[in-house]
Each structure stands twice: as C-alpha cells, then as structure tokens.
Image (spheres, rainbow, N blue to C red):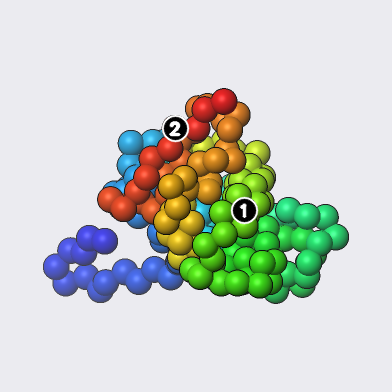
Amino acid sequence: FSQKKGERPRIVLINDADAAGIGEARQGAGKKYRRVLYLTISTGIGGARIINGAIDPQAQHFEPGHFTLIPRGRKCGCGRRGCFEAYGSGTGFYKTYGVRAEDCKDQKIWNEYAKMVGQGIINATKNAPPDIIVIGGGVSQVGNRGSHPPVGRIMGGRDSVLAVINGFGRSLTLPISK
C-alpha cells in the first residue's frame, strides 16, 4: 500500500485466502506466472484465483472447499453434502481417518488422502487452468513430512502445471508430468 503525505490510509478488508494468494502471486512462488491458483488446506479449504497479480474478477467468491467432491457424501459445515472441505480439510481428515493430520504416520492413509485432495484440486482447475498451483495451510505442511508430498503423487496428467507446496521459500516445486 502506498500513501501520499497528508492522505488518510486506505483500509482494505480481504478474505485470508485471497490475501495469501495475492501475496504468493506478487512476491512468492507465483510471481513469474500470469495465472495463479492458491489453495489453503487447513481447518477448512480456501482458495484464490489470481490473474496478473490481482483477484480474477470472475472468481470474486471462489470457494474451492465447497466444490462437490463426493456426491451425496458427508455433510459439510456449509450445509451441503460431499464438499471438498468435508474430506480434504484438517477437520475432514480427522472425521475420515480418526486421527489428526499432524499425528498421522500411516502412509496408506496419506496415499488415500492424496487422491482425494488431488481430485479436489483438479475440480478447482477445470474452468480456469492455472499456470501454477500454490498450496499452503497447516495440513499441506504436515503432508510434506514424508518422502513424497501427497499432492505431487496424484496430479499426473497435468504436464503444463507446476504445484508448489508451501510457497514463500518453504516450497517444494513439483513439475507435474504424465
């Protein structure tokens, strides 16, 4: 934000995922890319579609956590059934596997979870394919403890997209290939 002397500061209210997405697009892992998809996987799932460093005007209310992942599935906090957030978030992880993500050491669980998250990410990219996907949030950090980050294993077939897990210098860049 810039301010001229004597001017009142400009105050902007913005969704946390939008703010993180703009930060990654302008200064972080997405700064060399025109179309950035930012996803945060934490207690819930949020996201932002950024074009040329600004929120995509056609994605002002982009809520990837509430895209349908499993038709007629588990009830989500939003009231709908089968949302990505009901399965892919930290809360969803616990409800699905009976263990908190940060305590899970079972590679089979992580593999299954990776497939769900991968499908959620694919759903989020269908209408507007990004040049890069930047993934942040607490669950994404936990998932990176293993030798293979979960998201990288399941995004095959999208050879033009990069996935960066935990941008801003704490990232692991994964070329997505067939």
Name the disc covering residue 87, or none.
Answer: none
The x, y position of residue 70, in whole percent, is: 78, 55
The amino acid sitting under disc 1 is Lys
Residue pushed farthest left? 5
Give the quadrant of the C terminus: top right
The span from disc 2 to disc 1 (Cα, nearest Å) is 23 Å
Residue at 26% x, 61% y is 1
Q: Residue at x 78, y 70 (%)?
A: 75
Q: Report the amino acid beneath label 2.
A: Pro
SS at mark 2 in the image: strand
**Residue 15 appears in the picture as rendered:** no
* Residue depicted at x 73% and y 53%: 69
Question: Residue 134 at x, y = what percent?
Answer: 44, 48
Residue 108's disc is 1
Quarter where residue 3 is shown: bottom left
Q: Secondary structure at mark 1?
A: helix
Q: Residues within 10 Å of mark 1 (few under 14, many from 20)?
A: few
> Where is residue 147 shown, x and y percent of the image?
43, 47
Query: Badge 2 is on which residue?
Result: 175
Residues tagged 2 and 1 counted as in contact (Cβ below 8 A): no
In this view, the residue in front, 37 or 175, is 175
Asked whether residue 31 appears in the rendered view, the answer is yes
Viewer-proximal residue among 19 and 167: 167
Question: If you read the primary sequence from the N terminus, does the residue marked by circle 2 or circle 1 appear first?
Answer: 1
